[in-house]
Image (cartoon, rainbow, N blue to C red):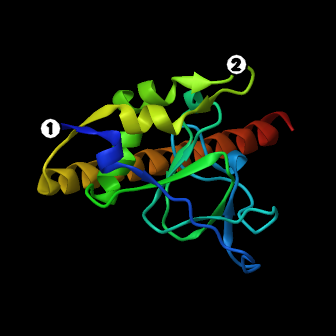
Amino acid sequence: WEQRKGAEVICVRRDTIANPPKDIVDVELENLIEGGGLQGDLSLRTASTSVFHEHDTLFGRLRPYLRKFWFANTSGVKSGEIWSLYSSTLKPEFLYALTQSAQFLNQALQTAGTKMPRAEWKTIVEAYFAVSQAEEQEKIGILFQKLEQLIDAEKRKLDLLQKKKTALLRQIFG
């Protein structure tokens, strides 16, 4: 592993689209789930023109302590309060794992503003991050994707059990 400056390994996408098609995915800050993932209505509903691409990591820069991020499985538009991160040197899955690390979050928490703190890009590009070789990056990325899938499956299972409990309580105490 070697220490690499953020500016060398992480980029923020600044592409825009003038007239997004009506069927494009629109990710707003409220769609990002704390700890990773998406929720809610993703249909185009705002004036978002900032683009993200499949395999980008979306990171909520407003109140970064909430740890809102998503590994994009599609392209779309997003809020300006969300960074669309990519790298020409890191594997996309590794970058996604890196943004969840204490190393990255500590830098993102060096915010500007008190009432509505925002992560500052300049702290990310100036920071150093531990980076492995490409083969190891791929293995790490795959491992964390599988763990995330397992966690999601357990959350769905818990949700179903809670619904079953509620239904049984209604039947008993109805």
Between the residue at mark 2 and the residue at mark 1, the CA separation in whole angstroms equals 34 Å
Residue extending farthest to the right is 174
- Residue 3 position by quadrant: top left
Of the residues shown, which amino acid type is indicated by label 1? Glu
Q: Is residue 45 left or right of residue 35?
A: right
Q: Secondary structure at mark 1?
A: strand
Left/right placement of residue 123 relative to residue 93 reads right
Query: Does any portion of residue 101 appear in the rendered image?
Result: no
Q: Residues within 10 Å of mark 2 (few under 14, many from 20)?
A: few
Q: Residue at x 66, y 53 (%)?
A: 39
Residue that badge 2 annotates: 114
Q: Is residue 21 left or right of residue 58?
A: right
Q: Which residue is depicted at the point 49% across and 61% down?
A: 72
The location of residue 130, given as percent across then percent down, is 22, 36
First-in-chain label (2 vs 1): 1
> Which of the two residues, 148 or 160, is positioned nearer the viewer here?
148
Relative to 53, is 143 above or below? above
Instruction: Pick out the residue farthest to the top.
Output: 114
Q: Amino acid at mark 2?
A: Thr
Q: What secondary structure is marked by label 2?
A: loop
Q: Position of residue 174 (x, y in %)?
A: 87, 38
Q: Is residue 158 visible?
A: yes
The disc placed on residue 86 is none
Q: Which residue is mark 1?
A: 2
